Amino acid sequence: MRYAVVLAAGKGTRMRADRPKPLVEVCGVSMLGHVLGALAEVPELARIVVVVGHEAELVEAELARLELGGVEVITAHQATQRGTGDAVRVGLGELPELLPGVGGSGAEVLVVPADTPLLTTATFQALLAAHAEGGNAATVLTMELDDPTGYGRIVRGRNGRVERIVEQSDLDDHEVAPTREVNTGVYVFDLAVLPIALRMLAPTNRQREYYLTDSVALLAHAGYRVDTVVLADPTEALGVNDRLQLAEVEALMCERIRRRWLARGVRLAGGASVWIGARVEIAPGATVGPNVVLEGRTRIDADAVVGPGSRLRDTVVGRGAELEAVVAVEARIGEYAVLGPFCVLRPGASVEPKASVEPFGVVG
């Protein structure tokens, strides 16, 4: 049995946003939506528990809007944000059949923060596979950084085994953990032992919070096997805590999306100047020119040409249509229609197949 707990209770003060941090968008999809989308593709994942707290009603509304296939997604409320350990404990409350004495070894739970939108299904699968193959009680997804400032450090004993994770905020002024390997905040735990470790957590750190990282030390000290999986590409686990990090992550996501469409036979004549939202669909053979923005549920059919300076939102472009500097919202453009330059399609507008819209024209 496989489960996932997604930590989405935080406020994210440094984001300076008017919405909870998990709902901040990256390429047109909330960070929470990206994480859940990747998790939903993990084989045999029975349930995802999203731990909510700050402005929980907004997060729950977002969950209702997401399309995640057949996986069950429910919420658990963390009334007071007292750290990641407490958040996971709250999440496990929605898995009552797996508490000690009822559950058993072999049941696994993925723990994932909601502010890591670049994580992929393949990484989750690799982490689960390593956890099962190693017979681990806990497996930590890690990365190696030249500058680990801000991240929890992986500390190993002389035998090379993981002993503990030291948070940046708890390093003494004279102490620097001698490692480049850092914690990403993503874990797999054996559900036969995790609830026990969580009950043993104490808020003895400087933040007076219950750290999930302390459960790693507790399990290792008790003789359970704890191991890591090191990401080949550290950028995949980048988290978002402020606007600068958001910009960096969105740039990486945009490049990932462009590469995906190039691999599927789409011509992106504008290179990096093309902005494509995560929900956009483009058929092979279509061409997208420079300085084009494609948003929402826009769909571009085969052989269509979306020319320079166009911005389309929730718009369907038919096969072979040609657009230049077109702005359209919730519009439908028929096959082989010719539009522009510098024309506007208002919400609900429709252009018939093979029709023309003259320069500076307005439809709708």
Image (tube, rainbow, N blue to C red):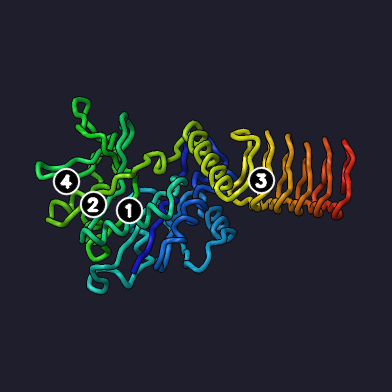
Q: Earlier in the sequence, mark 2 or mark 4?
A: 4
Distance from the alpha carbon under mark 2 to that under mark 1: 11 Å
Residue 361 drawn at (x, y percent):
89, 40
| Nearer-N-terminus badge (3/4) | 4
Residue 25 shows in the view: no
Front position in the image: 50 or 189: 189
Q: Is residue 29 left or right of residue 171?
A: right
Residue drawn at x 37%, y 55% as measured from the top left:
124
Look at the numbered discs 1 and 3 and tell me whether their residues touch, using CB distance below 8 Å. no
State the residue position of label 2.
215
Please identify the quadrant where the N terminus is shown. bottom left
CA separation in Å, label 1 and label 4: 21 Å
10 Å neighbourhood of mark 2: few (<14), some, or many (≥20)? many
Q: Is residue 91 above or below residue 364?
A: below
Please tell me the numbered disc located at residue 295. Answer: 3
> Which amino acid type is shown beneath numbered disc 4?
Glu
Disc 1 target residue: 86
Q: Residues within 10 Å of mark 1 (few under 14, many from 20)?
A: many
The amino acid type, in three-letter code, at marker 3 is Glu
Q: Residues within 10 Å of mark 4 (few under 14, many from 20)?
A: many
Question: SS class of the residue under badge 3?
Answer: strand
